[in-house]
Image (spheres, rainbow, N blue to C red):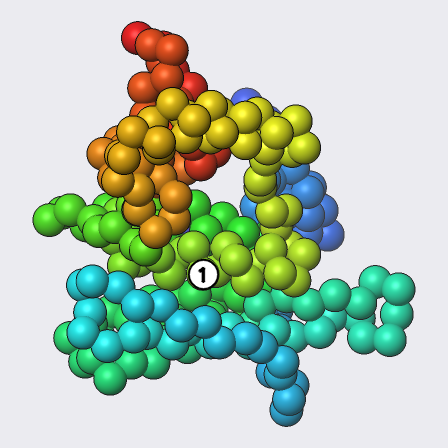
Amino acid sequence: MAVKIDKKITGYALVNEQEKLDAVAAKNQTSNVVAMGEPLSRPDILVGSTYKIKTPVTEHALYITINDVVMHPDTPQSHRRPFEIFINSKNMDHFQWIVALTRVMSAVFRKGGDVTFLVEELKSVFEPSGGYFKKGGRFVPSLVAEIGEVVEQHLQSIGMLKKVGLDEHQQKLVEEKRTEYFEKHAKAGEEMTAEGFPKGAQLCNKCQTKAAIIMDGCLTCLNCGESKCG
């Protein structure tokens, strides 16, 4: 294609094909684009676990199966990582979005890399109409969040996530607070839940359990030890 030059030519230079290739290579090296790895291939046999959850928002229980692939088998670096997830239930009300969710999650698992971010993403989903309380007085913001808790439990069981809990000193403090409270109130005939917490306890913002009571002028959780003074 002909190009008309309207300005005076002040200089020129010749560019060969090799120089073009070198310029493209240099640009690629300085770019921040990170290439994703190839998806993991599926072995014929996978090992996994199935978790049963029963919620007030579904008539029937949900069965969540997470299958793992063994990476670097028969080596010191051998470990398991999630490969696919399935959710089965007699309740068909949530069928479409559950199938869509499990397919997307399975695709993320197979892509490799760090998949632990899925836990926080799922647990941060809140039901617009409000969540529900599980056995023990623990609040769950949505069914999706409970699926996230199952994924978290599974990742902890295979060593991809560290289980968060109270250390020895924190546990001792919680036990002391429980004993102190029961000595003052349990003998007075105050009703307790099946889990051993006062029925009038408030919801703890840290562990999402109805176990927070007023002690010494401070709102103290008898489950995790969280304390806040007004």
Residue 225 visible in the picture: no
Q: Quadrant of residue 93?
A: bottom left
Q: Residue at x 51, y 73 (%)?
A: 66
- The percent coordinates of residue 179 (x first, y second) are 49, 29
Q: Nearer the viewer, residue 167 or 157?
A: 167
For the view shown, which residue lies furthest in the bottom direction?
44
Compared with 126, 54 (above or below) is below
- In the rendered image, the vertical position of residue 161 relative to residue 88, given as above or below: above
What x and y, as percent, mark residue 213? 32, 25
Residue 192 point in image, percent of width and height: 30, 42
Q: Nearer the viewer, residue 134 or 152?
A: 134
Mark 1 neighbour density, 10 Å: few (under 14) some (14–19) many (20 or more): many
Left/right placement of residue 115 relative to residue 140 reads right
How far from the left and from the top, in percent, is residue 110? 55, 69
In which image quadrant can residue 160 be found?
bottom right
Residue 61 can be seen, yes or no:
yes
Please name the residue shown 64% across and 89% down the image. Answer: 45
Kind of element beneath mark 1 = helix
- Residue where numbered disc 1 is placed: 150
Which residue does the image show at 30% across and 54% down from the upper left? 134
